Image: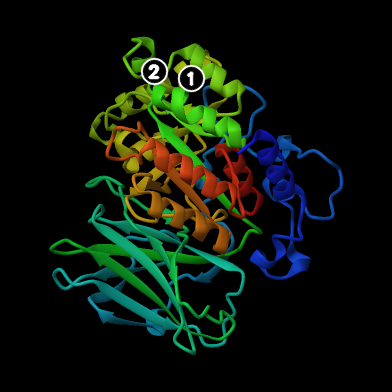
Amino acid sequence: MTRNRATRRRFLALSGAAGLTGMAGCADRFKSASDELSGNSSDDSSGDPDDSAVPGLTDGVPPLETEFDSRERYRQPGESFDDFSDLDAWTVGRGSGEADTDVVFDGEQSFKLQSNGSENIIAQRSLEGEDLTETDLSFAVRTTTPQSLAVNLRLVDQFGSEKVYSLREITYRSPDVGWFRSSPGVFQQSEYEPALDHLDRLEIQVLHSMSEAEIWIDDLRTHETPDQGYVMLSWDDGTRDYYETAAPLHDEYGFPAVQAAVPRWVERNQDGTMSVSELQERQEAGDQIVVHGTHNPIHELDDESAIEARLRQDKRWFVDNDFEGANYIVYPHNSYDKTSLEYATDYHYCGGFNQAGNVNTTNVYGFDPLALPRTIGHDLEISKRCVDLAAQHNQCTVLNFHTFDASNTMPEADYESLLEHIDGADVEVITFDDLWRLRTSNS
């Protein structure tokens, strides 16, 4: 494990098509990672990425307020596949389904699905004649019964092989629920890879462990699959465990981290927390310091003025302390709801999360900018599987850590093994800036 090795690997990832073309399919669609991250086409030989062309991306410390509402601007990426205006193509095998003209994301109606008690919900439609090769999917979703609920999109070919995209958990807090867009990554695939140009059907599966489930689906869209996979290593709370133990490993591999610090803990010099100068040191080393803010659940605030004031105050601390990642947010306790999202767009372009303990990845071109998914980095094998799926299906995994003695973070030795595994995989380790370039380049 040497810095030279990591530098050479990064150079290969950014410059070479030869080793990665097979991952994406047709060679004539290949773009290098640097082109993809900047939004440039593969025949653009102008050199350095033009970040000024990326909406919302700043050079240095960002302003306090955003220039636009990212959720509105990137509300309907890609191309429409099914707007659910005609439900005749759909059959519901478990649970019940109906058109809903009162609760709609776009158009005149949505597809409302309900469970019959505790059983799962399954709806399906034919995909005969469709070709979804090198194609990812996204959909608008709303549920009054979040938390213990997963949504799968299951593609089945004419030979019985399957590919399952899965949003493993929804941490959108009730009762103030609203729509968000999900573009889940692949959770599992048959041993025999499905023939995506000879498909049989698409299933929407709603899996839950509650006495009932209620969910609305709308605006199913398709997106081009990127040309490689991505990994984000997200550390919450700005802990000294990261600074003293994980950071040297990151530097050895040349991997940046995304760190979400808690200002109150930093200012109080709370035990186990990095100082402002240490966070700034890590920013200089290549890490991205993003907003975590007041470490209380934001959905518990009832007063809209209090929500707005908190978001503004939290971001101001990061701006005042010269942290360049202040346009991005990690919600404390993964707490957010419809109202807080409406105000979050005034200060942030991207963040989340819908967090799960199992594989919970995302495609890079179709997700809701402020409702990203991520996976708790508590288990080495689950985390390695996230990385492998990101490499195999050219998607992104966000892995989350806190401190090595906590149950939500794998032990130090396992973390070092994870970094070694990432170093050997066909993935690029990225920050929020990189993910934002990707998201806005194919809107």
Circle 2 is placed at which residue position? 263
The answer to whether 98 appears left or right of 235 in the picture is left
Where residue 22 appears, x then y in whole percent?
68, 67
The answer to whether 9 appears left or right of 267 in the picture is right
Of 205 and 271, the residue lying toward us = 271
Residue at 66% in and 40% down: 6
Query: From this viewpoint, is residue 347 visible?
Result: no
Label 1, label 2: how far apart the Cα atoms are: 8 Å
Of 266 and 418, the residue lying toward us = 418
Q: Are marks 1 and 2 in contact (CB under 8 Å)?
A: yes
Above or below — where is 101 with respect to 46?
A: below
Query: From this viewpoint, is residue 336 visible?
Result: yes
The answer to whether 19 appears left or right of 336 in the picture is right
Above or below — where is 237 with respect to 398?
A: above
Circle 1 is placed at which residue position? 318
SS at badge 2: helix
Query: Is tag 1's residue or tag 2's residue first in the polypeptide sequence?
Result: 2
Q: Amino acid at mark 1?
A: Phe
Query: Can you say which quadrant of the picture contains the N terminus?
Result: top right
Q: Amino acid at mark 2?
A: Pro
Residue 265 placement: quadrant: top left
Q: Dot 2, how many residues are within 10 Å of its Cα: few (below 14), some (14-19), or many (20+)?
A: many
Above or below — where is 349 with respect to 152?
A: above
Where residue 224 appears, x then y in whole percent?
62, 63
Residue at 52% in and 22% down: 64
